[in-house]
Image: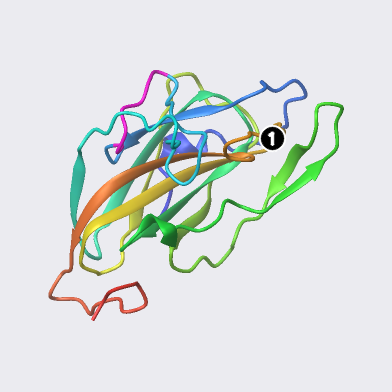
């Protein structure tokens, strides 16, 4: 699994000194479970952007996939911040989704500022890929970051794939610490030619 060339454009060792105070991204693929505005909101609250007092508008879209196939991930940063992305999958309930990345912070007059987030070099279920699109400089305006992520060979009627962005050099977000969140609803039908991935919930 290799990022699309557009994602590779964002790799840089340079950290901008004057970064914006917030960051946003749009989930372009798979189809988001919520209607997003031009910045990608709602996205601050975990695990999937919506809050109890601001539930957003569901799209009703479900992406149908075959187990073991590659799921295309396509995002666009609408407001830049250094950091990285992570992709996770819940099968039976969104409570299976992992906690946001553990953050290293520094103090500031305005409160804690994120320095880095923990990346698992060998992610396991429910995480599919970690440290995706890691970057320290803005991508060209309008650029999409794209990659393909292999799905487990499972059966699930209402899976959720979660794509999060951990932001470095970012103040504390009351609803999601240093992370922004998007989700998409999936229906996965196992490929009968492949063994079932029994390490995932509900698989026999």
Q: Residue at x 63, y 29 (%)?
A: 137
**Which of the pair 78/34 is nearer the observer?**
34
Residue at 57% from the left image edge and 36% from the top image edge? 175
Q: Is residue 139 above or below residue 114?
A: above
The answer to if 190 sits in the magenta stretch is no
Seen in the image, is 157 located left or right of residue 180?
Answer: left
User: To which quarter of the image does residue 157 belong?
Assistant: bottom left
Relative image position of residue 22 (x, y in whole percent): 62, 25
Residue placed most toward the observer, 1 or 47 = 47
Residue 134 visible, this angle = no
The part of the image, by quadrant, that contains residue 88 is: bottom left
Residue drawn at (18%, 68%) of the image? 190
- Is residue 12 left or right of 145 when viewed as pictured? right
Magenta span dominant secondary structure:
loop
Estimate the x, y position of residue 84 in percent, counting from the top left. 57, 43
35 is within the stretch colored magenta: yes
Residue 99, compared with residue 38, is above or below; it is below
Quadrant assignment for the C terminus: bottom left
Q: Residues within 10 Å of mark 1 (few under 14, many from 20)?
A: some
Q: Is residue 77 left or right of residue 82?
A: left
Image point 20% across, 76% down: which residue?
194
Judging by the rendered image, the residue that carries numbered circle 1 is 172
Visual colour scheme: rainbow
Q: Residue 121's spot in the image, x, y percent?
A: 58, 63
Q: Which residue lies most toward the front here?
A: 53
Relative to 197, is 133 above or below?
above
Q: Where is residue 94 shown, x and y percent of the image?
A: 38, 55
Q: Secondary structure at mark 1?
A: loop
Whether residue 170 is visible: yes
Start-end of magenta stretch: 32-38
159 shown above or below 155? above
Picture quarter with the N terminus: bottom left
């Amino acid at each position: 699994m290799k990022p699309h060339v557009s994602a590779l454009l964002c790799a840089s060792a340079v950290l901008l000194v004057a970064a914006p105070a917030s960051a946003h991204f749009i989930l372009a693929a798979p189809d988001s479970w919520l209607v997003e505005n031009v910045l990608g909101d709602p996205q601050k609250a975990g695990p999937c952007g919506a809050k109890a007092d601001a539930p957003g508008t569901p799209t009703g879209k479900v992406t149908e996939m075959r187990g073991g196939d590659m799921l295309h991930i396509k995002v666009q940063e609408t407001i830049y911040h250094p950091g990285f992305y992570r992709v996770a999958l819940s099968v039976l309930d969104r409570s299976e989704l992992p906690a946001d990345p553990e953050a290293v912070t520094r103090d500031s007059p305005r409160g804690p500022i994120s320095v880095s987030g923990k990346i698992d070099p060998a992610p396991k279920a429910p995480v599919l890929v970690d440290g995706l699109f890691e970057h320290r400089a803005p991508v060209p305006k309008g650029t999409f970051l794209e990659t393909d992520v292999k799905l487990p060979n499972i059966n699930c009627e209402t899976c959720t794939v979660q794509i999060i962005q951990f932001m470095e050099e970012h103040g504390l977000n009351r609803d999601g610490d240093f992370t922004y969140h998007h989700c998409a609803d999936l229906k996965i039908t196992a490929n009968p030619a492949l063994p079932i991935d029994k390490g995932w919930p509900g698989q026999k």
